[in-house]
């Protein structure tokens, strides 16, 4: 069994995101396109975005650190560490209000 410390993984990804021109970096902890479940830690440097995109299917987002704004057609919400959200099944985007890291869990098969 491999144990991952999400805080440490998040900080590693944030360090990488801070030097990327896109202001983001991610690592998939488990799963791939052939798996039923995929979990990815995504880091966004302050002021950067994940532009609007389609929902990947059933998915949840858990904020590990920082502060994020999620916007969608049905409204927006500000998320802080410890917040957990079922992503809306519609186009949505994220904006990092501070250096932020999150755990995205996606059910890749319906």
Image: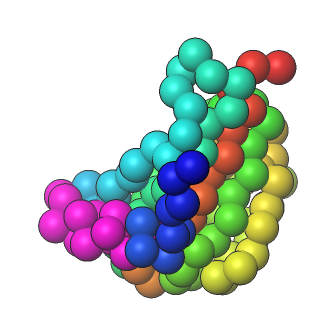
Q: Is residue 39 above or below residue 49?
A: above
Magenta segment's dominant SS is helix
Is 28 above or below relative to 34? below
Residue 53 appearing in the image: no
Looking at the image, the residue that sits furthest to the front is: 1
The magenta stretch is: 10-21
Q: Nearer the viewer, residue 15 or 21?
A: 15
Among the 4 quarters of the image, the one containing residue 49? bottom left
Report the residue at 71% width, 24% height from top: 36
Q: Percent from the top left, x then y, of residue 30?
A: 55, 40
- Is residue 18 rendered magenta in the image? yes
Left or right of 106: which side holds 20? left
Q: Where the C terminus falls, by quadrant?
A: top right
Residue 43 in percent (x, y) is at 42, 64
**Total marks placed:** 0
Q: How is the image coloured?
A: rainbow
**Residue 96 image point, x, y percent:** 48, 72
Residue drawn at point x = 66 percent, y = 82 percent: 80
Q: Is residue 59 left or right of residue 17?
A: right
The quarter of the displayed image where residue 74 is located: bottom right
Instruction: Classify 91 as above or below 77.
Output: above
List x then y, in percent, for residue 88: 80, 47
Residue reaching furthest to the top: 34
The reply to whether the magenta stretch includes residue 42 is: no
x 82%, y 54%: residue: 86
Please report the residue visible at 68 percent of the width from the left and 33 percent of the height from the top: 37
> For this rendering, which residue is in front, 105 or 45?
105
Tell me, yes or no, if residue 22 can be seen here. yes
């Amino acid at each position: 069994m491999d144990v991952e410390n999400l805080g440490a993984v998040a900080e590693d990804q944030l360090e990488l995101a801070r030097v990327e021109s896109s202001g983001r970096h991610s690592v998939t902890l488990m799963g791939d396109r052939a798996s039923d479940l995929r979990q990815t830690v995504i880091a966004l440097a302050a002021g950067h975005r994940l532009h609007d995109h389609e929902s990947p299917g059933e998915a949840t987002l858990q904020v590990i650190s920082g502060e994020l704004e999620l916007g969608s057609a049905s409204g927006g919400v500000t998320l802080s560490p410890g917040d957990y959200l079922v992503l809306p099944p519609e186009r949505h985007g994220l904006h990092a209000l501070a250096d932020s890291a999150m755990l995205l869990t996606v059910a890749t098969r319906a």
